[in-house]
Image (cartoon, rainbow, N blue to C red):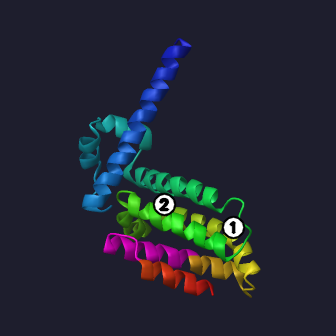
């Protein structure tokens, strides 16, 4: 196969994968994860079932990819917002604001935050990501003088996720929730 044809096939495959992920986020907003079937997904994306199974293998693998896609996007934005800030309160709040703002902007996030724990592969990914976040955030809590910085970072992650759910239920950023988060840091 000529190199140019290989590049266009790769680009087409990536476009199909992206279409499936974006369609899943739209559907998750309407149906939740439990209602997100492969049939609905391929109809929404306008692709064949064969394309779905070629890219993801099964529904569980797809849900894991959906979760990773969302969190990878947010992780990049959080890292950018925190870059150059010294460990501590402002750095933690910068990351929290980015997370909360992005949760409000992304489709299907409520379903990902509420229902994802029921999927074993996704639950393992959530645990892995939370542990990674806690490792990164422990320096921030150490700089705040916390006696248990790792555990503080773990609880911070849970607090921010719960704040995102409150804001999603309210349909907008909620100043009192964000002020309460700041109060937790002292």
Instruction: Write the residue at 54% across / 62% down.
Output: 125
Q: Disc 1 vs disc 2: which is toward the camera?
A: 1
Q: Which residues are magenta?
A: 157-174
In this rendering, is residue 24 above or below 103?
above
Q: Which mark is residue 121?
A: 2
Residue depicted at 48% across the width and 16% down the height: 5
Residue 153: image location, x then y, percent: 64, 77
Residue 162 falls left or right of residue 44: right
**On the picture, is 37 further left or further right than 53?**
left
Residue 184, above or below 85: below
SS for callout 2: helix
Q: Residue furthest top?
A: 2
Q: Residue at x 56, y 56 (%)?
A: 77
Residue at mark 1 to residue at mark 2: CA–CA distance: 23 Å
Report the front residue among 162 and 57: 162
User: Which residue corresponds to mark 1?
Assistant: 136
């Amino acid at each position: 196969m000529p190199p140019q044809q290989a590049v266009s096939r790769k680009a087409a495959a990536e476009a199909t994968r992206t279409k499936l992920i974006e369609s899943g986020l739209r559907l998750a907003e309407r149906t939740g994860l439990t209602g997100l079937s492969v049939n609905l997904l391929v109809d929404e994306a306008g692709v064949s079932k064969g394309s779905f199974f070629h890219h993801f293998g099964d529904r569980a693998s797809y849900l894991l990819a959906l979760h990773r896609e969302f969190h990878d996007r947010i992780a990049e934005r959080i890292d950018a917002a925190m870059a150059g800030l010294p460990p501590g309160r402002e750095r933690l709040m910068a990351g929290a604001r980015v997370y909360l703002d992005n949760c409000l902007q992304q489709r299907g996030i409520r379903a990902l935050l509420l229902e994802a724990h029921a999927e074993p592969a996704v639950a393992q990914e959530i645990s892995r990501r939370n542990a990674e976040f806690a490792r990164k955030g422990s320096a921030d809590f150490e700089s705040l003088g916390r006696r248990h910085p790792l555990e503080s970072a773990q609880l911070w992650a849970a607090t921010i996720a719960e704040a995102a759910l409150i804001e999603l239920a309210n349909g907008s950023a909620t100043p009192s929730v964000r002020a309460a988060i700041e109060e937790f840091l002292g």
